[in-house]
Image (tube, grey):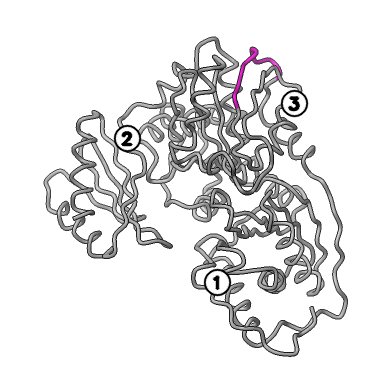
Amino acid sequence: MAAPTEPAPRTDLSGLVKAYDVRGVVPDQWDETTAELFGAAFVQVTGARALVTGHDMRATSPGLARAFARGATAQGADVTETGLCSTDQLYYASGAFHLPGAMFTASHNPARYNGIKMCRAGAAPVGQDTGLAEIRALVERWSEHGAPAPAAVGGTLTERDTLTDYAAHLLGLVDLTAIRPLKVVVDAGNGMGGHTVPTVLAGLPLDVVPMYFELDGTFPHHEANPLDPANIVDLRARVLAERADLGLAFDGDADRCFVVDERGEPVSPSAITALVASRELARRPGATVLHNLITSWSVPEVIRENGGTPVRTRVGHSFIKAEMARTGAVFGGEHSAHYYFADFWNADTGMLAALHVLAALGGQDGPLSALTRRFDRYAASGEINSTVTDQSERFAAVRAAWRDRDGVTLDELDGLTVSGPDWWFNLRPSNTEPLLRLNAEAREPHTMRTLRDEVLALVRR
């Protein structure tokens, strides 16, 4: 990378570099020049002699990925470009080739956004405490004082398609050959599920009804964020219209998968976590399974009932992946529909979770609603976001209101979790927005509603 004749304007990365990744508006917050600096910094911080890249279907993604590769090769690293891929497909390449990787995507964010999810060899996460802060510091310095000098010998650039190998790896982990025929509606949301699903599900006893498989980073039908109920309205209606056995919805980079049953009703990610945990424990009796602190009480219950050891963690993939490596866990699940597998380098893959659901459903005769009922035992609020200008003050008010009540316990592993004999709630401040996020659960629906409304009244006062 040749040094510019004049120092480039200093890049403000304060809103661009998040806790786990890089994400912001293009070109307002970053552009290909910045991406090139990120490529150089990634090589310097990780010491990578070779790495792999991939990108989603957004209009800006190919250019940003190629700019990152220019920065990396200028520092002497060889770059394998996998081109269009899902985020978990990039993790596959990082694991299978034992190379650091960079995925260009803004996941479920609107079209004007883009970002980078970076990992070390074997899909190990790069977050604020594992290299991202150092990468940011280098990019900030170079944006002010000029790009780094190139290596004496530049790296090479090669292209390699990994889709077939990725699909084969997943199908080697879950046997679907003997399941009964199923009709499944899949909403790709114009994201990368439209790229991966046809190859992964090809040849299986499935009648796949595709929705929005056209790759389009402008998201013309709905945002590729199935966590928002508004974005699965079309899927729910189509499942009913087709009389399908289930529906699947993927987010923009297809690393998360949401499930709808035959009635068009959403199946909670906690229930999917418990279902997959029971299957993984059947293969590895006595293993450890992780769940973040916002998943339902039913998750650790099911893990124990199946002979496993539940371990509660903070929210966030970098924490989950680190804890999986520390504990040797076989599986981990989050309330946001991120599912982590030891057989997938401890990385998250919504596609593998979907295959487990298809295998479980197709291996018995009942409907999905009956299958998941035993994993979905309590009344939950779902995640409720409140915009507040005095985040710390409102958070403190909730803590003060509950700390002296009889029979109540408080812990602050991640935000504030308050637990009673038949209920709990968690309140977490957002790291990037003026939001407080509430999740509540109780054994009875009326208890949950009362609890939810009492906490929200304090938060929104």
Left or right position of 425 against 135: left
Q: Which mark is residue 133?
A: 1
Left or right position of 182 against 153: left
Q: Who's the residue at 66% across and 56% down the image?
A: 104
The spot of residue 267 in percent (x, y) is: 45, 28
Residue nearer the viewer, 233 or 446: 233
Q: Is residue 138 above or below residue 92?
A: below
Amino acid carrying mark 3 in the image: Ala
Q: Which mark is residue 202?
A: 3
Residue annotated with mark 2 = 380
Left or right position of 228 against 422: right
Mark 3 nearby-residue class (10 Å; few <14, some 14–19, many ≥20): few
As helix, strand or loop, the secondary structure at mark 2 comes to: strand
> CA gap, disc 1 to disc 3?
42 Å
**Residue stretch rendered in magenta on the structure:** 177-185
Where, by quadrant of the figure, is residue 28 drawn? bottom right
Where, by quadrant of the figure, is residue 214 drawn? top right
Q: Is residue 85 above or below residue 205?
A: below
The label nearer to you, 1 versus 3, is 3
In the rendered structure, which disc, 3 or 2, sits on the residue that comes first in sequence? Answer: 3
As helix, strand or loop, the secondary structure at mark 3 comes to: loop
Could you tell me if the residues under marks 1 and 3 are in contact, i.e. CB atoms within 8 Å?
no
Residue nearer the viewer, 11 or 305: 11
Q: Is residue 392 one of those drawn in magenta? A: no
